[in-house]
Amino acid sequence: MADDIMLTVDGPRIPKPIAIEDLLLTRPMFSHHLFLLTLDDKLFLAPIRDPKKVIDVGTGTGIWAQDFADQFPHADVVGTDLSPIQPDFAPPNLRFEIDDCCSTWTYPPNHFDFIHIRCMYGSVAEWPAFYFECYDMLYDVYRAKIQRRHLVPGGYIEQAEISVRVCSDIGDIDPDSVWGENNRLFFCAGEASGRTLVIQEKLKGLIEEAGFVDVVEHQYRWPLGAWSQDQKLRDLGRWNQHRWEEGLEGWSMAFCTRIMGWSYEQVKAWNVETKRTMRDRSLHIYQNVFVSPPMSRHAWVWAE
């Protein structure tokens, strides 16, 4: 899960950044709280009522999967990730598995009626292939229900992603500013690694190409800092600033040194300037968030 940690993976895969040990739990908690604030304490937007089998792809620390399993104690929930950083304790209806979502899925057909994906930017090289795997899982559920004459709709996939591009509420970002450099940096780093960091704006189209229908996309804003006059946005801005301040060194150090060829000193200096600039409330900086939930042939996508 990109927003939790990025671990170095041995083998042919591009190494992923690894965050400082203490941030493995704190930054995902900030993100989870931000999503709850955004969705008014809802864990998802898809109109599911009685899920039976659910998978949280790229579960990271497992915080979303734990909350979902608590909310739906009769659902069989599995959280998958390449990194074994999940807690030993979990609700009885939740299990964690070490698995690579970019490989062929080994689950049987007719298996999941809800697939949840969040903050996977920078983790998947072939998004179309990934969505086709999801479609196959959900389409079999949909087809089986029709054969059994059930009238309920098919399974759902929901994906939520945070745009790494920052914007300003008062005009275009100066390309020579820290934030202009930030936007170039993460675009170039993603492309160089073969795992794009700017999947957010393409979610809806790629999900539709995989065969999903009735794709609904919701867009939200997360300010960076408490500059908004709106109380909810101001709260989101405070938490998002904490998220950046806690996680910046971990993921920027990995991306910049391993992929972009920066020195340690260059990254440290850039981080200092970035943190200084993000406290400037006059810039009105924010990120977009996308959330998309569609049904088996349907999907929901949402972006921040």
Image (cartoon, rainbow, N blue to C red):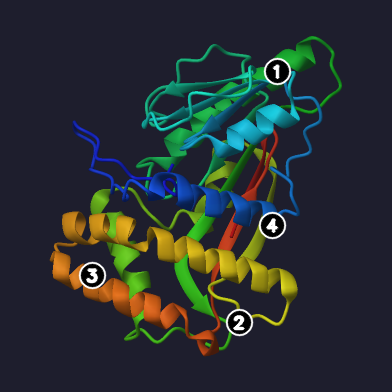
Mark 3 → mark 4, Cα distance in angstroms: 31 Å
Name the residue type under label 2: Trp
Q: Earlier in the sequence, mark 3 or mark 2?
A: 2
Residue occupying the point 43% across, 46% down: 4
Give the secondary structure at mark 1. Answer: helix
Q: Earlier in the sequence, mark 4 or mark 1?
A: 4
Image-based side of 240 in relation to 275, left or right: right
Horizontal and vertical percent position of residue 300: 67, 44
Pointers 4 and 2 in contact (CB under 8 A)? no
Name the residue type under label 1: Arg
> Which mark is on residue 268?
3
Quarter containing the N terminus:
top left
Mark 3 → mark 2, Cα distance in angstroms: 26 Å
Mark 2 → mark 1, Cα distance in angstroms: 49 Å
Of 288 and 30, which appears nearest the observer?
30
Horizontal and vertical percent position of residue 209: 55, 42
